[in-house]
Amino acid sequence: MTKKEIAAKVALRTGITHKRAVAVIDQLLAEIKSSLAAGEKTEIRGFGVFKVRRTKRKVARDLSTNTEIVIAPTRRVKFIPGKQMKEKLNRKLAAAE
């Protein structure tokens, strides 16, 4: 599902315009991004938690030239689904079997 499709559903269910729904979604995502960029976690109850995870510096090997490559440490976003999200996913899975 794309942002455009989400905005269309939000607009339909809330009665706001599509343009306004896109603006709300853009602002929500901007707030999540700025929180993560600051190293903070973002928790949406019933949905999940977005956290910043740091990776360590790694040494890998280029197999074609057999030389060592240093991979710099980075920050990555980790999503941990909330309890309600897990329950909903597992209900759908159990119903499909």
Image (cartoon, helix red, strand yellow):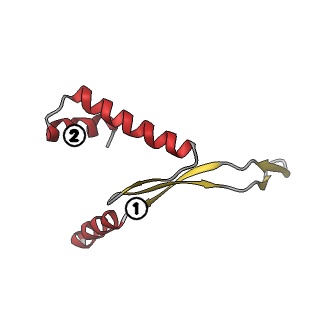
Measure the alpha-carbon separation of dots 1 and 2: 21 Å
Quadrant assignment for the N terminus: top left
Up the image or down, 19 lies above or below 94; here it is above
Q: Residue at point 33% right, 37% down?
A: 25
Secondary structure under the numbered disc 1 in the rendered image: strand
- Report the amino acid beneath label 2: Val
Quadrant assignment for the C terminus: bottom left
- Report the amino acid beneath label 1: Pro
Q: Which mark is residue 10?
A: 2
Work out whether residue 70 or residue 82 is closer to the camera in this orientation and state it. 82
Question: In this rendering, would 13 be left or right of 33?
Answer: left
Q: Which mark is residue 81?
A: 1
Q: Residue at point 21% right, 71% down?
A: 95
Q: Quadrant of residue 43?
A: bottom left
Question: In this rendering, would 39 be left or right of 80?
Answer: right
- Residue 45 at what x, y percent from top left? 34, 58
